[in-house]
Each structure stands twice: as C-alpha cells, then as structure tokens.
Image (spheres, rainbow, N blue to C red):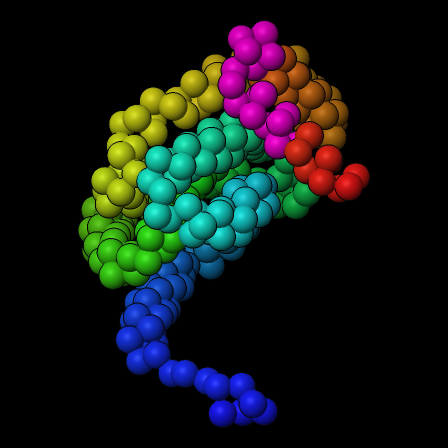
Amino acid sequence: MIGGLVLFFDLERFKYHFSFGVKITASALLDTIFNNLYNIIIGKRFSTEQLGYYNRADSLKQLPINNIAGALNRVTFPLFSKLAHDDIALKKYYKTILLVVMFLIAPVSVLMVVVAEPLIRFLLTEKWLPSVQYFQILSIGGIFFPIHAYNLNILQAKGRSDLYLRIEVFKKVVIVLVIISCIQFGMLGLVWGSVLISIITVFINTYYTSKFIDYSIINQLLDIMPSILKAIIIGVIVYMLDQYIFIQMLDIYRLIFSSIIYLTIYFGLAFLLKSKEIFILLDLIKGRRNKASE
C-alpha cells in the first residue's frame, strides 16, 4: 500500500507484456542490423564512390515515403489496437488506410523515377548524377512500403509478437539469399535485388495477417493496382514530355512543369473516374478540419 493506494502485481500480465516486448525488441534489433547490411556489402565489394551514390539515393528516396506512410504508420497502430478484437472493422479500416496511402505513394514514387535526373542535379549538383539509376530503382521498391508496414502493424495490434519475430527471421534469410544471388551481377544487380526483396517480403508480411482479417495478398494487390497502373501510365507520358520537350529547360523548370502536369493528370483523372480513394482522402481532410475548428 502506497499513500492509501493498494497496488497489485499481476504476474501473468507481466509475463505476457514482457514476452511481447522482448520479441518486438529482438525483431527491431534484427531489422537494424540488416538495414546496414547493404552498406556493409557495398563498402566491402564495391568502391567508396558507389557506396556514397547508393546512400544518397536511398536517403533521398525515403524522404517522401517516410513522411507520408510513416506519419500514418504512427496513427494506425493505436487504431488497429482498438479494433484488434473486431476483425470485420479491422479489415475495413486497414483497407481504407491502405487504399489512401497507396493512392498517394504510387504517384510520388513514380514521379521520382520520372524527374530523377533534374531532381538530383538540382538538389545535389552534377557530381551526384551517377546516383540517378540507383534512385530510380529504389523508388520502384518504395511503392510497396505501406503494405509492409501496415501488415506488421496488424500483427502487433493482435499481440502476436511471436509471429512478428518469426516473419522477421524468415525475411532476413530471404534477404541473404537474394543478395548472394544478385551480387554477381554487379552494383545494379544488387540494387535491383532490393526491389526483389521488397516484392518477396510483401508476400511474407501478409501471410499471417491475411488469415487474421480475411484479406489476402491477392485481394490487397487487386485493390491497390488501379493506383499503381494509373501512376505508371501517366509517368510514361510525362517522362516522354520531359525527354523531348522539357529537357532543354533549366532543371527547376523541368521539375515544376513535370510535377504539375503529372499531378494534375493523376488527381484530375481520379476525379473524372470517381475513384473512391480521392473521396476517402477528401473526407479525411474534412474530418481533420472539422476537429481543428471545434
């Protein structure tokens, strides 16, 4: 008793939370180690310059993806936790969030591929142009980041840190195998290997969550594919415009014109086709404005 307050120690609850925390910590530690694996291998196998180009491309790629998906990722876990015992509601909210985030991530990722050259030369100067290819390839792999993050959030919300750790260990084995297979094709092969890893691990991350909320990876891909296909098709059109018309302009103007045309077509098409993602996004924005004004 402390200050008239009776305290109880629940050993079973402690064991549960301790077991959950240990597994999540082990997963995070394993992930941290492997996040630096590419840097170690590139530094050992290839030149310092190539390592610098790769690091710069990777850090630049992560800025928009982390800002969009990462911000929502911090919100989704508490939300998923509240709905952990209602699989129908959990699936509904998960699907809504996935659609909206992919609706935003897909065009941003493809646009980065399209404007990679003027973007890097404008931000980092001419000497960093060798990182353009790496940046473009890594941006392709970045499209799948939301699926990775939100599926793992479901496992944590369900309290299944054991499955979370199992998945992380299995993914690391896959990463090692892909690296061993791709490194023989040189630096570009290794970078393309990261895209392959991203695709393979999508299926690994969704294996258990698809069973929990009855939302298979095939159905997830079918739901997000319209956004990805529209982003790619518009990207091809804008890339052709950039290469044949805007290429004579200063980099800043190439970036402005390409971005405005791309985003105008993408979001304009979404309105014309009455894509549900755009209306979900508008409802979310209106909801936040209403809360802010209260």
Q: Is residue 94 above or below residue 181?
A: above
Residue 194 in view here? no
User: At x 52% / y 23%, what residue is drawn?
Assistant: 277
User: At x 39% / y 58%, what residue is drawn?
Assistant: 35
Q: Position of residue 106 (x, y in %)?
A: 49, 29
Q: Is residue 213 above or below residue 81?
A: above
Q: Viewer-proximal residue, 4 or 135? A: 4
Q: Viewer-proximal residue, 274 or 15? A: 15
User: At x 28% / y 75%, what residue is drawn?
Assistant: 12
Quadrant, the C terminus: top right
Q: Residue lying at the far right in this picture: please name it.
A: 293
Quadrant in the picture for residue 126 = top right
Main SS category, magenta section: helix
Q: Viewer-proximal residue, 111 or 24? A: 24
Q: Viewer-proximal residue, 5 or 188? A: 5
Q: Is residue 175 above or below residue 285?
A: below
Looking at the image, residue 53 sits to the left or right of residue 124; the answer is left
Total labels: the figure holds 0
Residue 235 counted in the magenta span:
no
Residue 263 in view here? yes
Looking at the image, residue 122 sits to the left or right of residue 135; the answer is right
Q: Position of residue 159 (x, y in %)?
A: 33, 58
Q: Magenta residues, as a range?
A: 270-285
Looking at the image, residue 272 sits to the left or right of residue 122; the answer is left
Q: Position of residue 211 (x, y in %)?
A: 23, 40
